[in-house]
Image (cartoon, coloured by chain):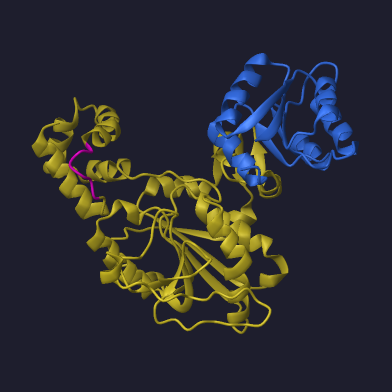
Amino acid sequence: MRTCLVVDDSSVIRKVARRILEGLDFQIIEAEDGAKALDACKRAMPEAVLLDWNMPVMDGYEFLGNLRRMPGGDAPKVVFCTTENDVAHIARALHAGANEYIMKPFDKDIVTAKFQEVGLI
Amino acid sequence: MTPQDYEYLRKLLKERSGLDLSADKQYLVESRLVPLARKASLAGIPELVQKMKVGAEALTAEVVEAMTTNETFFFRDKLPFDHLKEAVLPALAQARAARRSLRIWCAASSTGQEPYSIAMCLKEAGAMLAGWRTEIVATDLSLAVLEKSKAGIFSQFEVQRGLPIQMLVKYFTQNGELWQLNADIRSMVQHRQLNLLQDFSHLGTFDVIFCRNVLIYFDQDTKAKIFERISRMLEPDGVLALGAAESVVGITNAFKPYPDRRGLYRPNAAPTIVRPGVATLVPQAPRSVASAR
């Protein structure tokens, strides 16, 4: 079973994402900020990361830069999932190495479509 | 709604739009037409039917539109658009090199996601079609969806269903939570109202026809007739794309499917195009109607 790391400081969002992604046959690991997410990646690199932007300690953008510099860190498909829905943020995320981008609010159809788009389903 | 009202609506919808409602679809009619009746200040469907019977043509047109399913999203099913990019456009680019023009028809274009997905594919083809005259004709029964399509404005939800984020950034302009397709993509698509039950030969001939997820609502006989008429609109080496759950098998011999290109069909009399260095579309012999049953 493939693993998806869900990174969001909101436990409600993590719960919703977990429910959707478990329905798509992913095993879920949760992290509440970028620093904890990096620790999780050091322990075991996931196949996918669903990533919030604004979080305490380390935000999603900084996490992504660190992840892509780690050995094997170019492998996970990273899908931003954030309320930052302007073109400048999207372009910045893609430039930093994100594979897809979900603008909150989201639903199962959108997550499924985006994961299909990057070949995770 | 009385059984007589339902029967009246079934017959009318079949005649006007080809929609083939089975006997157990009262819930669908109620869910779509009760709001319409209320909007027209009528108590319910019996009053709506009464009004239609005395010749309220505008209301009847609204009923037909309300019963039309407009479910669509960008790059729906992905595969037909992969075929278009990887095989169909390269083959046609060679076959039409002398005339340098392509005509594509979206036969049930709804709110525009499909014709605009095709337009983006053509744009992405870049140098292969540079300087070509490309024409995408988008037709639909409903004027309301055509108007939405022409505007090319989509919600945040709509642009996230099937549209790769890179294409959103490249081809759309953001206005708050709405996204509008840029004028260069919008201008590639011509919109026309069209009922597939009526003559459409005036549209001319096409190199590619997308007729996806619309014939599923028609009965077998109507499907067969539309397939026959579509086959006369397609160039001999042209391509018909159907929806993921649709097929010509058992309905018509006017088209033959391609192996390894699921959802694509070619007129049955078409020659096979084999061009060195280009993805080749090799039609396979169709199963006969009799053996397919």
Classify residue B231 by image quadrant. Answer: bottom left
Residue B74 place in picture, x, y as percent: 55, 48
Q: Please tell me which residue is depicted at 87% across the width and 34% down the height of the picture.
A: A65
Looking at the rendered image, the quarter that the N terminus of chain B falls into is top left
Residue at the image point whose x is 66% and y is 46% from the top: A119
Res B116 seen here: yes
Q: Main SS of the magenta segment?
A: loop
Q: Is residue A32 above or below residue B165?
A: above
Q: Residue at x 63, y 40 (%)?
A: A114
Colour assigned to chain B in the rendering is: yellow
Q: How many marks?
A: 0
Q: Quadrant of the C terminus of chain B?
A: bottom left
User: Is residue B23 found inside the magenta-colored segment of the image?
Assistant: yes
Work out whether A3 lies above or below B253. Answer: above
Front in this rendered view, residue A118 or B288: B288
Residue in the foreground of this view, choosing between B209 and B55: B209
Residue A12, position as x, y percentages in the image: 63, 15
Colour assignment, chain A: blue
Q: Position of residue B156 (x, y in %)?
A: 59, 35
Seen as rendered, the residue at the extreme front is: A1
Range shown magenta? B20-25
Q: Quadrant of residue A113?
A: top right
User: Percent x, y for residue B232?
Assistant: 36, 76
